């Protein structure tokens, strides 16, 4: 999964963080374009939440929203001890361990958008319990890939796996946000993120993922 852009949208629809990681379509957009994109995503997300089919709302308690844990997504190595033996830097996730979390988790996004496929990109959205949205734009478009490029896995399963990988990755970005942004005494809620440490960590994780 090649991540092109990361966006963080606050609960009011304001863009508080945006970074490009490649010279593709996203690099042609200016800051005002991304503000419009963030507002549009927020609005469409709200509309999608309202038009969720009644049948799904009634049976929602029977729907499994658990996202399986996928090890070391966006991390440097699945074997930190091997890195130590080879004198390579070890990137610890947090005080919880090198991979931030090691268990499946429940998606809070139960009625809005989770994934959007187009001819040019795929968008993944991870929403937190407080309404903060982490958005990843990927250049991988599984919907248009021939079966020969996906292998034995059908497109539906491949898209579901990609969505689970994105959920794990964006949840780790959320963990980094909690560690480097929310613990900053000078940060004001709902305001643009200007933490260099957070920005550096996100770039490292995107680099490890691609």
Image: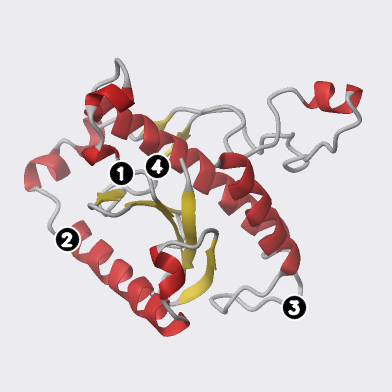
Q: Residue at label 2?
A: 50
Q: Residue at label 1?
A: 141
Q: Looking at the picture, how far across and down is residue 27, in whole percent? A: 46, 69
On the picture, is 86 further left or further right than 105?
Answer: right
Q: Which mark is residue 107?
A: 4
The earlier-in-sequence mark between 4 and 2 is 2
The earlier-in-sequence mark between 3 and 2 is 2
Q: CA distance from mark 3 to mark 2?
A: 36 Å
Residue at image coords 17%, 60%: 50
Way the structure is coloured: secondary structure
The residue lying toward the viewer, choosing from 162 and 95, is 162
Residue at image coords 47%, 81%: 31
Q: CA distance from mark 4 to mark 1?
A: 23 Å
Q: Residue at label 3?
A: 186
Q: How many residues crowd mark 4 within 10 Å: few (<14), some (14–19), many (20+)?
A: some
Residue at image coords 14%, 41%: 56
């Amino acid at each position: 999964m090649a991540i092109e852009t990361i966006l963080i949208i606050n609960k009011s629809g304001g863009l508080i963080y945006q970074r490009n990681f490649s010279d593709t379509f996203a690099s042609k957009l200016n800051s005002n374009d991304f503000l419009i994109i963030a507002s549009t995503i927020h609005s469409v997300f709200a509309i999608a939440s309202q038009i969720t089919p009644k049948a799904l709302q009634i049976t929602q308690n029977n729907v499994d929203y658990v996202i399986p844990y996928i090890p070391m997504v966006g991390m440097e190595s699945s074997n930190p001890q091997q890195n130590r033996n080879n004198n390579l830097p070890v990137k610890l996730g947090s005080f919880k361990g090198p991979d931030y979390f090691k268990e499946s988790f429940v998606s809070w996004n139960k009625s809005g958008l989770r994934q959007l496929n187009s001819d040019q990109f795929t968008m993944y959205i991870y929403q937190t319990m407080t309404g903060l949205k982490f958005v990843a734009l990927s250049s991988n478009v599984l919907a248009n890939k021939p079966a020969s490029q996906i292998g034995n896995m059908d497109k539906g399963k491949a898209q579901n796996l990609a969505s689970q990988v994105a959920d794990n990755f964006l949840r780790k970005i959320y963990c980094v946000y909690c560690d480097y942004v929310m613990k900053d005494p000078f940060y004001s809620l709902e305001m643009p993120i200007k933490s260099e440490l957070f920005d550096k960590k996100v770039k490292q994780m995107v680099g490890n993922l691609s």
